Amino acid sequence: MPQSETDELKDRVLEALEDVIDPELGIDIVNLGLVYGVDIDDDNNVLVTMTLTFMGCPLSASLSYDVKRALSEIEEIKEVEVNFVWDPPWTKDRMSRYARIALGLSE
């Protein structure tokens, strides 16, 4: 797939991931800064590398399911894998301005 098509698909993946809401904070995982990376191979398999707000968070299975469900709406995608990582650890600094405002945190 040409790079421009891969970039467009990656943008659509990130847009779809904005529909995945962290149930504890009520903000999507993209604006929370939980998504560290999206890799798409030549066969349109997607690897989402992400973290959680704290190690041991019981929501990993639920969020993994929600990520796969959200990306299943994109016809071109064949398979989705979610890789949870803990380094670097998540901090509030990773949140978007939108998430900070929604949670009442100062800039």
Image (cartoon, rainbow, N blue to C red):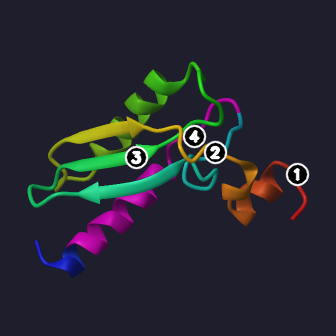
Q: Which mark is residue 49?
A: 3
Main SS, magenta region, reads: helix
Using residue 30 as the reference point, say whether residue 37 is left or right of it.
left
Check residue 104 for magenta coloring.
no
Q: Residues within 10 Å of mark 3 (few under 14, many from 20)?
A: some
Q: Position of residue 42 (x, y in %)?
A: 10, 61
Which label lies toward us, 3 or 1? 3
Q: Which mark is residue 90?
A: 2
Q: Position of residue 7 (x, y in %)?
A: 29, 73
> Badges 1 and 4: C-beta atoms under 8 Å apart?
no
SS type, badge 4 = loop
Which label lies toward us, 4 or 3? 3
In space, the residues marked 4 and 2 are separated at their CA atoms by: 16 Å
Q: Position of residue 11 (x, y in %)?
A: 37, 67
Q: Residues within 10 Å of mark 2 (few under 14, many from 20)?
A: many
Q: Which residues are magenta?
A: 6-24
Which label lies toward us, 1 or 2? 2
In space, the residues marked 2 and 3 are separated at their CA atoms by: 13 Å
Task: Answer whether residue 25 is visible to the viewer in this image.
Answer: yes
